[in-house]
Amino acid sequence: MMNYTDNLQRCKEYCEALEEERKKIQVFHRELPLCLQLVTQAIEACKQQLSTTSTENYGQSECSEQTSSDGPVIEEYKFIPIKRTSSFDEEEQLSNKSKKNNVGNEEKSTKKSDWLKSVQLWNESPDRSPDKDSPRKGVVEVKKNGGAFHPFTKENKISGISPQTATVRVSNSTATSSTVETANATTSTGGGGGGGGRKEEKEGQSQRKPRRCWSPELHRRFLHALQQLGGAHVATPKQIRELMKVDGLTNDEVKSHLQKYRLHTRRPSPAMASTGNPHPPQFVVVGGIWVPPPEYAAVAATTTGETTTIASGNGIYAPVATPALPVQKPSPSGSLTISNNKQQQKQSHSSNSEERSHSDNGVHSNSPATSSSTHTTTASPAF
DNA sequence: CTCTTAATAT
DNA sequence: CATATTAAGA
């Protein structure tokens, strides 16, 4: 009954959309091998259909996974946000979304949604009291708010940022943050005396560096760099650092952060394998797997179904995001599958690696309340 | 006290 | 550069 043309058109659009998505996820083919494969299949199927349709029935639905329903073509199509095609603002978040929709899965992504959330602004040490040891008054940092880190901030969050500080941190965003920071703690007061410097001093050798906190901005840059480099698994700390162009950031810091990131990134495939597992091989992917890089927001958004939220993030991202996108990993094997399900072993006496939900750091309510917040609000800005 | 995360050691 | 270990902070 429906017009063929109509169907055709839709199929075409769908196809295009899929291809678009495929491009996006290609970068993460390691992390989402299945995803990529599925999309590819879908595309092929669609194309085939397109080619055959003209001559005759469109009945053959080889298309993707859709069951044999008559309306072969795109049932899912409707779920897919059409808007995209034109520009790429977001990244793969969309892709996840589309997949998810297919399944209609109900995965809650709450837990994983963002470890990132924890990271706030640059909090360097929680502000030592001025009188205590080193007077670090508001020295340098001012550079620019747009920058990535803010030296000492303690409060954060949207709520009320203290206006007092000269440095207004501003949510900034939009746009390119081309300007990046500079100063930073390096301030060695070099010579002279007075300034507020920090302690340099001879501490023999170990004095642990004050923790550098990864602000959302910083993390954003980090992710950004990661993307340009083709994923967390191929990127190397040095490259990342260079790409981030954050002054004062050391290789080690990046390395450490990368380590953590990878740790979290690796897929903790859920125990879907149990004997009579209800769900077959669907594309549930996202739900069960730790979403790779920059898609936490997506996840949150996805679940709800709203597209909006995510958008915000793009501001920063957008400018640079796509251009590079160079990477094709040479490595042939994408043989990563979903398996391996390990429970944490926690402290035994030594080696302990973890994995598990990340409670947020910054806010630290730690309460169940979190559930409520999740979408909308907070997360958005980052990336 | 536990857990996450950054620093440092290997 | 990758991992492992140690430790700070919450």
Image (tube, coloured by chain):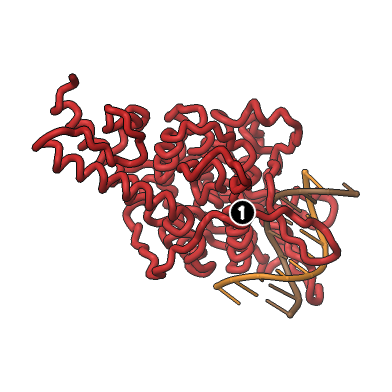
Chain colours: A red, B brown, C orange
**Residue A98, picture quadrant:** top left
The single residue placed furthest to the top in the displayed view is A1
Label 1 CA crowd tier, 10 Å (few <14, some 14–19, many 20+): many
Q: Is residue A59 left or right of residue A155?
A: left
Query: Residue lying farthest front?
Result: A276
Q: Residue A107, percent across and down?
A: 56, 35
Residue A270 at x, y percent in the picture? 61, 47
Front residue of this view, candidates A373 and A198: A373
Dot 1 amino acid type? His
Left or right side of A129 for A299: left
Q: Residue at x 66, y 66 (%)?
A: A188
In the rendered image, which quarter contains the N terminus of chain A? top left
**Residue A77 at least partly seen:** no
Q: Is residue A286 above or below residue A139?
A: above
> Extreme left residue here?
A55
Q: Chain of mark 1?
A: A
Q: Quadrant of residue C6?
A: bottom right
Q: Which residue is label 1 attached to?
A: A264
Q: Is residue A88 left or right of residue A148?
A: left
The residue located at (63%, 63%) in the rendering is A256
Q: Assign a secondary structure to mark 1.
A: helix
| Residue shown at the point (45%, 27%) measured from the top left | A306
Q: How many numbered marks appear?
A: 1
Q: Percent from the top left, x then y, of residue A300? A: 53, 34
**Direction from residue A10 to residue A264 in the image, left or right:** right
Q: Where A281 falls versus A1 (above or below)? A: below
